[in-house]
Amino acid sequence: MDTRRCATVRFSIPFCDVDAMQVVWHGNYFKYFDAARDRLFCDAGIDLYQTVAGTGLVFPVTRTQTKHIRPLRLRDEVECKAVLVEAECRLVLDFEIREAATGALCAKARIEQAAVRVADGTLELRVPESIRRALGCIRHDGE
């Protein structure tokens, strides 16, 4: 049984995301991944905009890897799932986009984010404890 934190969003592919062939442009996949990641963080009670104010940290994307398996097309009903893989030294999330009706896998990705100090741009070598705790990576007793 997989006990990692995850979240899924469901949506229909809008007209503005497709090209003349009615296929989703590859750059729009990151918008879908962001929606699932945002849902995962919101479900954990984390607002990354408030985190900036509270910790002085931002979490820029430092690495992406995407495998496109089946094209997404205009008005396809899809589900995008985000799964938290790591939240110790960086945030690592895996994503899957599937056709809602059939469950057919359309794309998968891994995205990494680092904690960076806004004031001077220095890289933090650990995700703040408050975020790790909210994500369920450490218990309230410190383990």
Image (spheres, rainbow, N blue to C red):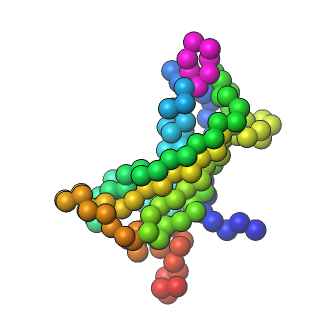
Decide if residue 21 is in sight here.
yes
Whether residue 116 is situated above or below residue 78 in the rendered picture? below
Residue 40 painted magenta: no
Number of numbered markers: 0
Highlighted magenta segment, given as a residue range: 18-24
Q: Is residue 71 left or right of residue 28?
A: right
Residue 23 painted magenta: yes
Q: Residue at x 59, y 46 (%)?
A: 109
Q: Nearer the viewer, residue 66 or 53?
A: 66
Q: Is residue 107 left or right of residue 90?
A: right
Report the magenta stretch's main SS.
loop
Q: Residue at x 59, y 53 (%)?
A: 94
Q: Residue at x 53, y 73 (%)?
A: 137
Residue 44 % position (x, y) = 50, 62
Residue at far left of view? 119
Whether residue 41 is situated above or below residue 97 in the rendered picture? below
Q: Is residue 131 left or right of residue 121?
A: right
Residue 11 % position (x, y) = 61, 35
Residue 105 % position (x, y) = 73, 40
Whether residue 4 is situated above or below residue 41 in the rendered picture? below
Q: Nearer the viewer, residue 125 or 105?
A: 125
Residue at far right of view? 102
Q: Residue at x 58, y 63 (%)?
A: 85
Residue 65 % position (x, y) = 55, 46
Whether residue 55 is situated above or below residue 76 in the rendered picture? below
Quadrant occupied by the N terminus: bottom right
